[in-house]
Image (cartoon, coloured by chain):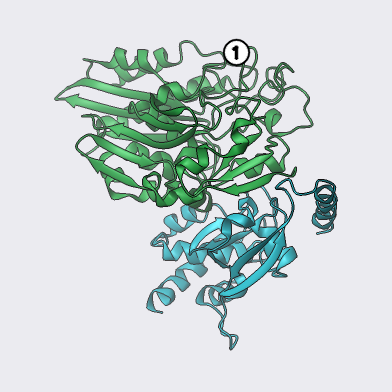
Amino acid sequence: MTVTLLERARADASVAAKAMDGTEPRSTTLRINGRDHRLTLDARTTLLDALREHAGLTGTKKGCDHGQCGACTVLVDKRRVLSCLTLAATAEGQDVTTIEGLAKSDGTLHPMQQAFIDHDAFQCGYCTPGQIMSAIACVQEGHAETEAQIREFMSGNLCRCAAYPNIVDAIQQARPQMERA
Amino acid sequence: MRPFSYSRADNIQAAIHAPSISDTQIETASVHASHQYLAGGTTLIDLMKLDVMRPRNVTDINALEHTPSGEISFGPRGLHLGALVRMSAAAEHADVRENYPVIAQSLELAASAQIRNMASLGGNVLQRTRCTYFRDTSYGTCNKREPGSGCAALEGINRSHAVLGTTESCIASYPGDFAQALIALDAEVELAGPKGSRRIHFAELHRPLGNTPHVETVLEPGELILAFMVPSAPWAKRSLYLKIRDRQSYEFALASAAVALDLDGGTIRNTRIALGGVATLPWRAHETEQKLKGRRPDDEAFNEAASTAFAGAKPREHNAFKVQLGKLTLVRALRQAATMEI
């Protein structure tokens, strides 16, 4: 995280030195988990950094930061995307859903969150928010019909602890529950 | 990432007349072009983070999704694929799956579900090589990134590199899958730019390397891909994409084949073949197609065809295996296409 903060400080400095050439930070409103967040963002800010560093929602994780690991997966207008390769500015006017937006206000977990606990579908937990967001979309897309299909359509989410068999089990538990809901 | 000016274009005219385009001193198709269009961003933002691409102006064209460039249509003359359609939408489209299986498969077997939701079709064909020496700026020599600096891959770790279409200036493999389907099926590309609109063959879009591997396409400054047109053809339904890679999913091709066959009883009336993972640009195997015309669809014909396809291969130290792998991939693809139920 230190790296990100340092980079931002450096970015702020270079922007300040070049006044009003289109690169200065601008006000950006992001609708995250049903709530508007008005943020002042440099054009370079990714959706991932906007969530974590500006909106204070650190549930979404930064793994590779290059679109290779899936840890940063969030839903934008119900489609799963990689927030590390999405500029925050391009998400303006769209509905962003993160791991923080899944549980009900009384604390009841989303069926997919509960299924990950029931099946011990993680060890270190770092990839888990991305896995859960991706798994929810996988079910909603209709790509969780068989084990093979789940494995194929979840291949964009790496788990270095290799909890894959349990992740597949969790998705198979949650799918009928989500379809009933 | 270096600072840039971000703007949005709500329609084609606004995009191609963005003021920053006229300031462009360097070829749009070059990695160093000062202006870039942004759609899914899965290549551009990645390469900007790596400091390989350094645009000063970025025009967000995602709003063109709400124009015909965001639509798919199918009729007697063929298939129209808007350039802002996402890979996942095209892969799942019933008309595409039914009538052009090779297109649906090339998209479905590429990247991950998240990336397919983001990446546009137009951006997909323009994705840049995964050559490590190109992506890592700590290497001083890369003719694609720093024209005239040399090629570190020639004597470096070149396992993933191309064996067809290479020169002494670059052996970087073209990484895409969808482009192989388009070039095989004689697709055309609809372009709009500050100087007007034009339509070109997809096969003309990517430039052979020559001595300028840093200029990858014929796109003029500010020129934008609006759509792909894939003609209807008797071989389109009997088509498939076979992709061989180090892991089963979410990986670039070591070798791939886009094939389409038109069978007349026991003989091959016509065929279309393109090869991926083995060439420096989308690669149509014209000579191989000619060899198969009028032949029976059997292993003898397929093996001869595969030898023809790789006759000009120039393997390097670590990628010699791609010649044999490429041949076997093509043979298996042709075998599968010949026995497809359509």
Relative horizontal placement of residue B95, taking residue B5 as reference (left or right): left
Q: In front: B56, or A76?
A: B56
Q: Colour of chain B?
A: green
Residue located at (43% from left, 21% from top): B204
Residue under pointer 1: B167
Q: Is residue A9 left or right of residue B312?
A: right
- Disc 1 on helix, strand or loop? loop
Please identify the quadrant where the C terminus of chain A is shown. bottom left
Mark 1 crowdedness (10 Å alpha carbons): few <14, some 14-19, many ≥20: some
Residue drawn at point x = 36 percent, y = 50 percent: B92
Against A102, residue B172 (above or below) is above
Q: Where B293 sits versus A49, above or below?
A: above
Quarter of the picture containing the N terminus of chain A is: bottom right
Residue A108 locus on image (x, y percent): 56, 85
Q: Residue furthest left?
A: B265
Chain bearing mark 1: B
Tag 1: amino acid: Thr
Report the label total: 1
Q: Is residue A55 visible?
A: yes
Report the residue at 68% width, 20% height from top. Answer: B143
Residue B109 showing in the rendered view: no
- Residue B201: x and y in percent read 38, 24
- Residue B323: horizontal and vertical position, in percent? 50, 19
At horizontal 55% and vertical 65% (from top left) the residue drawn is A133
Q: Which chain is cyan?
A: A
A141 on left or right of A26 = left
Q: Is residue B186 above or below residue B314?
A: below
Residue B39, given in percent of the width and then of the height, sits at 53, 45
